[in-house]
Amino acid sequence: MAVESLVFIISRLVFGAGSTFLAIILWSRTRDTAWMFIVVGTIFRYGQIMYDTFSLFGIVRADIIVVPNYLGMDTILENLPYVFFIVAFIIMIRRTFRKW
């Protein structure tokens, strides 16, 4: 494994862990629905980073299929955080436009 790849993997793990840790602290302090969706999206994003790292080192199989011939675990973990972010942004937009 090249040094560049190792630096890339370690930086993703470190910054992902930092953002997830801070997101969990925020989650314990806020009850705002939009922020909770952002926090859950961040946690799932870190789960995707961990899954990629584990599959790279052979700890987890990389070809886990959730729906045969259609949907794999990598596709779900790649897109699920964005679903939570979209929901959070929709909640915030609806709040903002109600005040006008």
Image: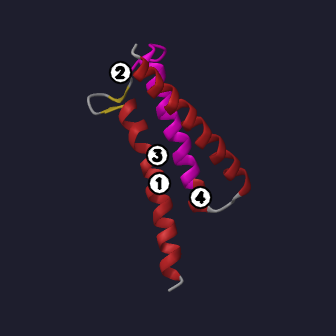
Circle 2 residues within 10 Å: few <14, some 14–19, many ≥20: few
**Earlier sequence position, callout 1 versus callout 2:** 2
Name the residue tied to disc 4.
35
The magenta stretch spans which residues? 37-62
Q: Secondary structure at mark 1?
A: helix
Vertical order, 78 against 31 (above or below): above
Kind of residue at disc 2: Asp
Q: Secondary structure at mark 4?
A: helix
Instruction: Tell me the tag on residue 85.
Output: 1
**Earlier sequence position, callout 4 versus callout 1:** 4
Name the residue tied to disc 2.
63
Secondary structure character of the magenta stretch overall: helix
Q: Nearer the viewer, mark 1 or mark 2?
A: 1
Q: Nearer the viewer, residue 11 or 61?
A: 11
Q: Looking at the image, do the residues carrying marks 3 and 4 touch, with CB atoms under 8 Å apart?
A: no
Instruction: Tell me the tag on residue 81.
Output: 3
C-alpha gap between disc 3 and disc 4? 13 Å
